[in-house]
Amino acid sequence: MSETHRVSIDLETLMALVNEVAREDPLDYADLPVDEAALRQACCLGALNILQHASEFKAEEVLYVLLSAMAKLIEENVLLHAQHIEKGAQIHSNLVRDVLERAKKGKG
């Protein structure tokens, strides 16, 4: 049986990693009145909170917790894109395009 474990990742390291990912795949904030750094920090704190709670579980359970959180975020992201598409926006993400294509309701 697996042991529980503690994972220690600090906010600055996580933010640096997210910043690196964002350089490769930037988000479009458009004209939203949002401070990108403040939003990113709040999201990183939320992710660290999930990890802190997940670290109380067995190792294989942590993977399920993190994967379920990731899948939910992807679903929310795709849903938001789909809503924007209905308003005439273009899809710029290959991931979103692929997921939407697989999720389209069959025409019957």
Image: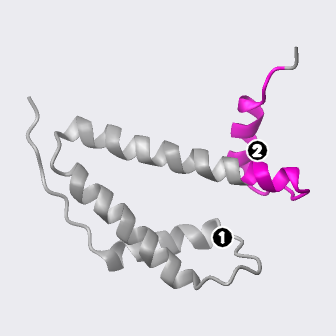
Callout 1 crowding tier (Cα within 10 Å): few <14, some 14–19, many ≥20: few
In this image, 99 relative to 10: left or right?
right
What crowding class fits label 2: few (fewer than 14 Cα within 10 Å), some (14-19), or many (20 or more)?
some
In the displayed structure image, the side of residue 36 where residue 18 appears, left or right: left
Which disc, if any, is residue 88?
A: none
Kindly tell me whether residue 91 is visible in this rendering.
Answer: no
Q: At x 49% / y 75%, what residue is drawn?
A: 40
- Observer-nearest residue: 3 or 34? 34
- Magenta range is 81-106
Q: Is residue 93 left or right of residue 107?
A: left
Real-space CA distance between mark 1 and mark 2, rounded to the nearest whole angstrom: 16 Å
**What residue did someone put label 1 on?**
26
Our reading of the magenta stretch's main secondary structure is helix
Above or below 61: residue 21: below
Mark 2, residue position: 97
Q: Identify the residue shown where x is 22% and y is 54%.
A: 53
Q: Position of residue 45 (x, y in %)?
A: 36, 71
Residue 34 vertical placement versus 85 (above, below): below
Give the answer, above or below, for where 70 lies relative to 36.
Answer: above
The amino acid type, in three-letter code, at marker 1 is Pro
Q: Residue furthest right?
A: 88
Residue kind at label 2, given as amino acid type = Arg
Task: Please say whether residue 99 is one of the residues in the magenta stretch.
Answer: yes
